């Protein structure tokens, strides 16, 4: 099966929100302005099989909403990340951050080139984000960064 990764459009908002809700992820901040910072992974028939988004700040992006349906190839996840790096570069960003509370995912993210970051290393503008404030209240949250 051939998968397609494309940038989300405003028409994708409802479908993306429903997809993320089914995965028990929040959809706060996903709107007409932020949809341009989301990538969608679809199968040949156009069915949504994965997503990866970025909350954009001046020089940095905060990755969010990584969801893939069961059965997606690891290669497709790598391509999704690679495309997000390209999008961040297009937008003139200097780096990407992500937050996770799943330590089992660390080897994958480190393989992708992310390095652990202390909370003090987060850009100060991140603290304006509702998403980050929520993540900071989760005890076992880990932060990782990727320099562009």
Image (cartoon, grey):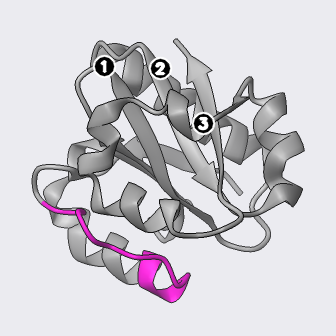
Query: Does the magenta segment cover residue 97?
Result: no
Q: Residues within 10 Å of mark 1 (few under 14, many from 20)?
A: some
Q: Residue 81 bears which disc, if any? A: 3
For residue 81, say whether it is visible.
yes
Q: Is the residue 34 above or below the residue 61 in the image?
A: below
Q: Residues within 10 Å of mark 2 (few under 14, many from 20)?
A: some
Label 1 to label 2: alpha-carbon separation: 7 Å
**Cβ atoms at labels 1 and 2 below 8 Å apart:** yes
Please name which of the two marks, 2 or 3, marks the residue nearer to the observer: 2
Q: Residue 59 bears which disc, if any? A: 1
Dominant secondary-structure state across the stretch colored magenta? loop
The image quarter containing residue 115 is top right
* Among the two numbered marks 2 and 3 on one chain, the one whose residue lies closer to the N terminus: 3
Is 145 left or right of 78, judged from the image as shown? left
Magenta residues, as a range?
20-31
Label 2 to label 3: alpha-carbon separation: 13 Å
Q: Is the residue 69 above or below the residue 73 in the image?
A: below
């Amino acid at each position: 099966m051939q998968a397609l990764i494309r940038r989300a459009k405003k028409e994708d908002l409802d479908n993306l929100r429903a997809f993320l809700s089914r995965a028990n992820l929040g959809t706060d901040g996903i709107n007409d302005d932020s949809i341009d910072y989301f990538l969608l992974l679809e199968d040949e028939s156009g069915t949504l099989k994965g997503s990866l988004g970025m909350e954009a700040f001046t020089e940095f992006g905060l990755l969010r909403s990584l969801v893939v349906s069961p059965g997606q190839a690891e290669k497709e996840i790598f391509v999704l990340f690679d495309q997000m790096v390209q999008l961040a570069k297009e937008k003139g960003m200097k780096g990407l951050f992500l937050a996770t509370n799943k330590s089992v995912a660390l080897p994958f993210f480190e393989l992708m080139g992310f390095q652990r970051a202390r909370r003090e290393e987060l850009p100060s503008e991140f603290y304006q984000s509702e998403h980050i404030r929520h993540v900071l209240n989760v005890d076992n949250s880990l932060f990782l960064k990727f320099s562009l």
